[in-house]
């Protein structure tokens, strides 16, 4: 009772930042977590994902590759130039004619602008840079760009989201649209809004990407997961970000 | 032996439904809302069935259903309780719900435990085999039939 009063006062004072919850019932899955886990996420000294942020900050200004350039040499101060960037990804790459997610964009910059060795999916450096850049959007509302190419990508993502797959014959939507909040083997099913990626998952004992989480779910329904960086995974990411539009970014989130 | 079974397999593959080996059981026939008769020709074993039902990597049942299993923490609430399933349904009705519940409700979230077709992008480890083998399904049917109000 007293706790909810405190929350209400903080909310009125605007101290809680942009919404983890939308008027239509969409909400960050942080809201269903235990108080201990929420506290871990909110305290930068206790949030294990902050280690990736710190690693990423160091990498940001480290010169790399044949070009001998750092991210900072072109993009300057990430706390200024990267603000809001993660909230607008996946974005449309007109040159490629495809959608690119934030980790993919960083990996492309690495090979094309820095002339450096590729950063493989889920490698510590790629995760660290992605987490650092996404952290600059913490507290900002997810704001997917309007773009005809992206609209098609999202439509493909929505089809993938609603298609039943795997030996267990379930779609993402079966659980995360229709049954969110109910219990699967005792565990509440989350709405699945990707507000905090890359995030630290206790189950992984590591920071990981949204693509890793999507592949976990595919394996869970006994489907063949798409390979990392596959256009299908980027399309799902694009649809999910639109589905979460307006919710506040939390990177690095902590999840069970 | 191997050659013989290969030949039979080939013939079955080539001739499809026309090639009915003379000693095979007749294909299961749905009657009303039931699939009567054990396809294995043997009654299932309720104790083995219980073990399958509570096993979260074999039967998977308690991920969605709850039931009279006080020893099992973390039961799902997505689907009706299994308590009293044997009173509500005949063994044939239970069998059809497990083998292919889509026959009764195309939108059901319950997987068809006896089917290996009509699925999309099944993982390699699971491809071309049903979730449970026919004798395992019979064990589960036998166990569920014991759950009476």
Image (spheres, coloured by chain):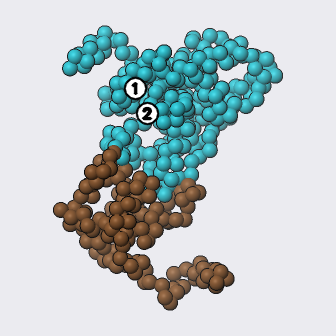
Chain colours: A cyan, B brown
Spatial CA distance of label 1 from label 2 is 8 Å
Residue highlighted by disc 2 = A256
Q: Where is residue A183 in the image (x, y as percent from the top left)?
A: 33, 43
Query: Which residue is drawn at the image coordinates 34% and 24% (left, top)?
Result: A35
Position of residue A64 relative to residue B52, above or below, is above
Q: Which residue sits furthest bottom?
A: B22
Q: Which residue sits furthest right?
A: A66
Q: Can residue A185 be seen in this view?
A: yes
Residue in front for this viewpoint, A40 or A64: A40
Query: Which residue is drawn at the image coordinates 54% and 59% (left, top)?
Result: B126
Apparent side of residue A38 relative to residue A89 in the rendered image (left or right): left
Apparent side of residue B86 relative to residue B20 in the rendered image (left or right): left
Q: Position of residue B135 (x, y in %)?
A: 42, 72
Q: Is residue A147 visible?
A: no
Chain of residue at mark 1? A
Position of residue A169 relative to residue B144, above or below, is above
Q: Is mark 1 on a helix, strand or loop?
A: helix
Query: Which residue is drawn at the image coordinates 64% and 28% (left, top)?
Result: A124
The quadrant of the image that shows the C terminus of chain A is top left
Mark drawn on residue A92: none
Circle 1 packing at 10 Å, graded few (<14), some (14-19), many (20+), is: some
Q: Are marks 1 and 2 in contact (CB under 8 Å)?
A: yes
Q: Quadrant of residue A173?
A: top left
Q: What element carries label 2?
A: loop
Q: Where is residue A19 in the image (x, y as percent from the top left)?
A: 37, 22
Residue highlighted by disc 1 = A37
Q: Which residue sits furthest left?
A: B149
């Amino acid at each position: 009772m007293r706790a909810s009063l405190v929350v209400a006062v903080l909310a009125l004072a605007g101290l809680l930042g942009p919404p983890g919850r939308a008027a239509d019932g969409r909400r960050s899955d942080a809201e269903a977590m235990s108080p201990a886990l929420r506290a871990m996420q909110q305290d930068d000294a206790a949030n294990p994902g902050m280690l990736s942020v710190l690693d990423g900050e160091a990498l940001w200004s480290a010169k790399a590759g044949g070009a001998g350039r750092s991210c900072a040499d072109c993009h300057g101060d990430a706390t200024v130039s990267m603000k809001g960037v993660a909230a607008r990804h996946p974005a449309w790459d007109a040159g490629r004619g495809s959608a690119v997610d934030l980790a993919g964009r960083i990996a492309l910059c690495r090979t094309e602008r820095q002339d450096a060795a590729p950063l493989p999916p889920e490698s510590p450096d790629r995760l660290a840079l992605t987490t650092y850049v996404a952290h600059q959007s913490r507290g900002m509302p997810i704001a997917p760009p309007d773009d005809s190419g992206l609209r098609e990508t999202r439509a493909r993502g929505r089809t993938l989201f609603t298609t039943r797959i795997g030996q267990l014959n379930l779609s993402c939507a079966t659980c995360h649209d229709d049954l969110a909040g109910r219990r699967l083997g005792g565990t509440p099913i989350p709405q699945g809004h990707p507000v905090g990626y890359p995030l630290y998952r206790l189950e992984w004992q590591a920071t990981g990407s949204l693509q890793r989480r999507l592949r976990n779910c595919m394996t869970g329904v006994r489907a063949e997961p798409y390979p990392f960086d596959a256009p299908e995974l980027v399309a799902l990411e694009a649809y999910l970000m639109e589905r979460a539009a307006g919710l506040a970014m939390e990177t690095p989130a902590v999840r069970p | 032996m191997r050659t013989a079974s290969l030949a039979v397999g080939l013939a079955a593959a080539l001739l499809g439904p026309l090639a009915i080996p003379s000693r095979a059981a007749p294909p299961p026939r749905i009657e009303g809302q039931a699939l009567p008769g054990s396809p294995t020709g043997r009654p299932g074993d309720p104790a083995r069935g219980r073990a399958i039902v509570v096993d979260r990597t074999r039967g998977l049942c308690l991920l969605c259903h709850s039931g009279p299993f006080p020893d099992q923490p973390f039961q799902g609430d997505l689907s009706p309780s299994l308590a009293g399933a044997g009173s509500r349904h005949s063994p044939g009705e239970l069998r059809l719900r497990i083998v292919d519940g889509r026959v009764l409700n195309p939108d059901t979230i319950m997987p068809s435990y006896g089917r290996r077709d009509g699925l999309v992008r099944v993982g390699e480890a699971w491809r071309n085999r049903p979730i449970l083998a026919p004798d395992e399904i019979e064990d589960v049917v036998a166990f569920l039939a014991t759950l009476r109000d």
